[in-house]
Image: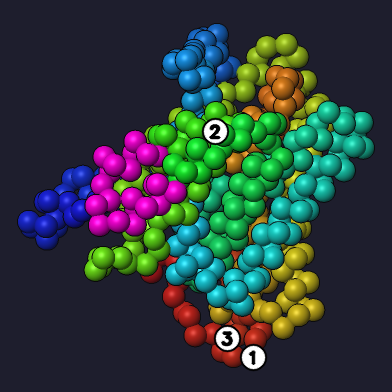
Amino acid sequence: MPGTDTHTARTGRPGARARIRRVLSLETTSGILLLAAAALALAWANSPLRDGYAAVSSTVVGPAAIHLDLSLATWAADGLLAVFFFVVGVELKHEFVAGSLRSPREAAVPVLAAVGGMAVPALVFSGVVLAAGDTVALHGWAIPTATDIAFALGVLAVFGRGLPVALRTFLLTLAVVDDLLAIVVIAVFYTASIQILALLGALAAVAVFGLVIRSRFSRWWLLIPVALVAWVLMHESGVHATIAGVLMGFTVPARPVHGESEPRTHQLEGAVRPWSTAVALPVFAFFSAGVSVADGGGFGELVAQPVLIAIAAGLVLGKLVGVLGMTALITRLTPLRLPDSIGIRDLLPVGFLTGIGFTVSLLITELSFPDAEHTDAAKLAVLLGSGISAVLAALWLRWDARQARLADMNEDGVPDRDLRRIGD
């Protein structure tokens, strides 16, 4: 298991490796790297050298004997993104066992808000493409339902200074439930066929990973080979290979074991998150965001696609209406209330933050359409919708932070006790 940095242990001050690891674990760092990778991909894919981008993306590497002769773009989506989903799985496990999801009553409002925030965008998307007569595009109904945890929390960290810390917990709870539901959607609706023996082998490898990660002899050189076997078998089974990452994340113990001072969910997240932030997510964004508008009909032709309008509307408007509408209904019609220090007005920027789909939305786009016409329009829609949502969220966060706050923001009849603020 990851240990303390030797420089830290010797001097009491974090060494260079520890400082780099801490910077790479920051939510703002993740957002910046994602934006930079996407911008680079867009610039290259629409430059005079765009053929080079296409050539790099389609370069095939890997052993054909075990069906791993994949393009670099596929390696990024199926392989590197499994690292990101492992971190998501670890975070979900911790939240369910020892975090914001351990109490059903406390988690009820953000959990239901997440459900509303997925259902309404799917309905908006379906309504738009059906009205336009593009029934082929219906397979992409799940694209605007996802929320990019890293990107959304990054925007909140930068522009939400002065707002209650409880708002971050609410957004995190909503986003992790959103991601959990997105994982279920990918496994159920975007798996064409299943090879049962390979799937059983993958589940057995995940079980072995769980035994090793819980043992006294858990070491990275034992865990990585088992994780690779689980990933290869999951890929061979036909289920999207990133599911292996989630399942292995769920096996990590969320409470201290064998006399350790902190749970292994914290240890593993601290060790793997920098790789996810600095390598997996930016490389995936680079290979997924390179939509070329310079060929054929160009930008105008892509914008005219119903799928673009459907996804952008689902992310910007569907997410906002789903989150705010569901929260307003359950807090008005049931005894459930928002967490301490949070009011309905705080959820306006949260609704926009959940419209930042990016990573998972781009992944579902890759799985949704067999043709480049719909795929390129959908990717452009994800980028536009996520960008608009991020800008609107930033503006409303700053507005909300400047407003006077009531003594009982969640209107539960008890004065707010948690007065901590983001940025304190």
Q: CA distance from mark 1 to mark 2?
A: 55 Å
| Residue 146 in view in this figure | no
Name the residue that disc number 3 marks.
407
Name the residue that disc number 1 marks.
413
Q: Residues within 10 Å of mark 1 (few under 14, many from 20)?
A: few
Looking at the picture, how far across and down is residue 130, in whole percent? 90, 37
**Range of the magenta residues?**
207-227
Q: CA distance from mark 2 to mark 3?
A: 57 Å
Residue at point 53% right, 60% down? 172
Indicate the quadrant where residue 295 lies: top right
Q: Residues within 10 Å of mark 3 (few under 14, many from 20)?
A: few
Does dot 2 land on a helix, a strand or a loop?
A: helix
Name the residue that disc number 2 marks.
198
Residue at point 27% right, 51% down? 218
Looking at the picture, how far across and down is residue 41, in whole percent? 52, 24
Q: Is residue 291 above or below residue 170?
A: above
Horizontal side, residue 86 vs residue 269: left or right: right
Q: Amino acid at mark 2?
A: Ala
Quarter of the image with the C terminus is: bottom left
Q: CA distance from mark 3 to mark 1?
A: 10 Å
| Residue 131 in view in this figure | yes
Residue at point 25% right, 57% down? 216
Indicate the quadrant where residue 344 lies: bottom right
Q: Amino acid at mark 1?
A: Gly
